[in-house]
Amino acid sequence: MASLLRRLMLIAGLCLLSACGGGSSGDTVTGNGSGDTSSSVDVTGTWAGSFTVGAGPGSTAVVAVIKQGTAAFFYDQTGVMYVLPNFNGGPTVTGILTAFAPVGVTLSNGQSTETFDITASVSSGSITGTFTGNNETGTFTLSPLAAFSSNPSLVAGNWQGFYVGSGTAAISLTVQSGGVFVGTDSNGCNLSGNISTTSTNDVFPVSVRSSGGASCAGNLGGLAFESRQDVSGFFGNTSGIYYYIGVSNASGAFVAELKVQ
């Protein structure tokens, strides 16, 4: 697990849920000390920063994507997705961090999922946290990142791309202007769902159904963000409009990079 986590925060200037909710059932949010949890610290958006685990050196955050109150996650370049507890406006968040490996990959525990206890301090300019579990301790520090400097929007059309961390497993979506999409992937799964046409700080809620085979994960939820950068290098860093999608459920997750054709 340590080798995966050390690569967890991959791209220095660029950060990508779930409904990612995988692990939010035990989450708590602490307010301002007076019992008031309504004083909101809204951290919706994309974040980047540094990460350490054990005695290993710090590394650069890949992506952290947060939608206040519903979904939050980060992922590394191996495609492992880490679902965070929900952020509900308080300065402290505690709960469960759940790691999900991509198809064909197992974690250090020999399984496709792994859980950790996490505590994070939250402000509008910084998220810092620690997690423990499986004889490991890690820390992270995140800062806001403008993944897309213009006005984010949903661009309809043919989106082509790949699952992060799954070799050359391809994904193809046809996205309508209202956000409804259908598609397929090279794992033999049929994909359908919806991407919200309204973003908050470049974060778009997503719902997906993946069906048709043993490796297809069923109903998942999460987040997407828009960028002008080819974060994973799948497209040779060519210019264009890219979307990064991270979704999960209780038993699985995936991260995908797609380019509008």
Image (cartoon, helix red, strand yellow):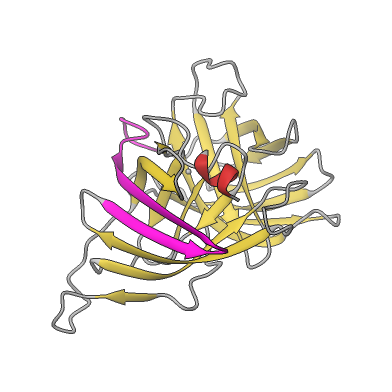
Name of the residue lying farthest toward the left? 34
- The residues colored magenta run 127-152
Q: Is residue 132 magenta?
A: yes
Q: Judge whether 201 appears above or below 43 on screen.
A: above
Q: Is residue 108 magenta?
A: no
Residue 2 locus on image (x, y percent):
56, 48
User: Is residue 80 rendered to the left or right of residue 152?
Assistant: right
Q: Judge whether 173 appears above or below 67 on screen.
A: above
- Using the image as rendered, state which of residue 159 and residue 26 is in the foreground: 26
Kindly identify the residue that appears in the image at 52 percent across and 38 percent down.
7
Kindly identify the residue that appears in the image at 47 percent across and 39 percent down.
154
Magenta span: predominant SS is strand
Kindly identify the residue that appears in the image at 42 percent across and 45 percent down.
52
For the C terminus, which image quadrant? top right
User: Is residue 165 rendered to the left or right of residue 64?
Assistant: right
Question: Visible in this render: residue 14?
Answer: yes
Classify residue 156 by image quadrant: top right
Name of the residue lying farthest toward the bottom? 35
